[in-house]
């Protein structure tokens, strides 16, 4: 198992070492191991946890409440006015009617940007439902289906405007819906996006000759992924990482 120093993790995750120490000491969010010399050692699981902490904070959650959310012991409470919008979407979801859900998502998309909806509404609502009981997970599955349907239509509409063509591929991630939401995000920033419907564990860029490939992992790329990316580029493939 590979271990990383606090400096390496800070650079990789874009977090100040002082902040990482505060997350550990003051908030109990991190539990790195120690070397024989007493230095902090982080593994890949720690890095994934840091990325999750960053997402919660980005979505408006005070750092003091993040631990309870990660451990699933408290409901999400967001500030800046997004909680009522999330609750409105949840109310529609609980009616278990696809047509009403479609109308709600279309209305929200007319009033907010893709970036705003993804980060402040869709991701937090999915996180709430996925850590709840089986009924909530079933409702989340309904939401996922309607979101993917909505994104597919949005991708088609975006091709009517000028843009750059690219293929979005999920790599070593297991969240299919987030992959499609990232495709929507890109389509609103000047891209004509084709998306592989399901993420891949093993990628073969030679299957897509001449195409611009955007890789999405849902987190910071690992050193192994960075090394593989360099290898593909040396072979002449046009491959880059896209991580929101």
Image (cartoon, rainbow, N blue to C red):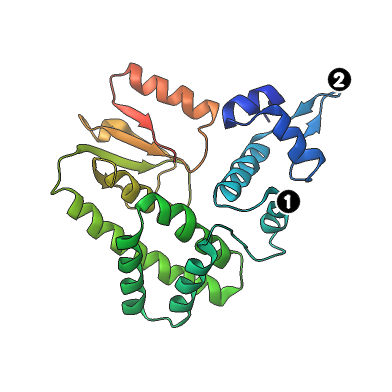
Using residue 106 as the reference point, say whether residue 123 is left or right of it. Answer: right
For the point 44% across and 38% down, the residue is 243
Q: Residues within 10 Å of mark 1 (few under 14, many from 20)?
A: some
Q: Residues within 10 Å of mark 2 (few under 14, many from 20)?
A: few
Q: Residue furthest top?
A: 234
Label 2: element kind: loop
Quadrant location of the C terminus? top left
Q: Quadrant of residue 16?
A: top right
The residue lying toward the viewer, choosing from 163 and 166, is 163
For the point 64% across and 28% down, the residue is 9
Label 1: element kind: helix
Residue 3 visible: no
Question: In terms of sequence position, does the residue under pointer 2 or pointer 1 come before the other?
Answer: 2
Q: Give the image location of residue 14, x and y in percent.
A: 58, 30
The residue lying toward the viewer, choosing from 43 and 14, is 14
Q: Give the image location of residue 66, x and y in percent.
A: 68, 52
Report how far apart the C-alphas of labels 2 and 1 lie in the structure: 30 Å
Q: Give the image location of residue 232, x and y in percent.
A: 36, 23
The disc placed on residue 64 is: 1
- Of circles 2 and 1, which is in front? 1
Q: Residue furthest front?
A: 80
Quadrant location of the N terminus? top right
For the point 47% across and 60% down, the residue is 121
The disc placed on residue 37 is: 2
The residue lying toward the viewer, choosing from 73 and 38, is 73
CB within 8 Å, label 2 to label 1: no
Q: Quadrant of residue 118?
A: bottom left
Q: Give the image location of residue 47, x and y in percent.
A: 63, 37
- Relative to 148, is 55 above or below? above
- Relative to 192, is 41 above or below? above
Using residue 159 as the reference point, say whether residue 113 is left or right of it. Answer: right
């Amino acid at each position: 198992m590979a271990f990383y120093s606090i400096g390496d993790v800070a650079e990789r995750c874009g977090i100040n070492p002082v902040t990482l120490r505060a997350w550990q000491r003051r908030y109990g969010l991190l539990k790195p191991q120690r070397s024989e010399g007493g230095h902090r050692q982080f593994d890949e699981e720690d890095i994934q946890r840091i990325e999750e902490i960053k997402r919660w904070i980005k979505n408006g959650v005070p750092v003091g409440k993040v631990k309870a959310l990660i451990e699933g012991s408290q409901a999400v409470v967001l500030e800046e006015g997004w909680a009522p919008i999330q609750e409105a979407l949840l109310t529609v979801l609980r009616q278990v009617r696809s047509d009403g859900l479609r109308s709600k998502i279309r209305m929200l998309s007319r009033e907010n940007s893709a970036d705003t909806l993804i980060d402040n509404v869709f991701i937090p609502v999915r996180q709430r439902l996925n850590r709840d009981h089986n009924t909530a997970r079933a409702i989340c599955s309904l939401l996922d289906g309607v979101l993917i349907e909505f994104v597919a239509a949005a991708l088609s509409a975006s091709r009517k405007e000028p843009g750059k063509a690219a293929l979005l591929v999920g790599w070593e991630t297991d969240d299919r819906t987030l992959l499609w939401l990232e495709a929507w995000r890109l389509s609103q920033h000047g891209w004509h996006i084709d998306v592989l419907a399901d993420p891949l564990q093993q990628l073969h860029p030679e299957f897509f000759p001449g195409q611009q490939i955007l890789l999405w992992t849902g987190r910071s790329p690992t050193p192994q992924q960075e090394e593989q990316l360099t290898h593909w580029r040396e072979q002449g493939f046009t491959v880059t990482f896209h991580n929101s």
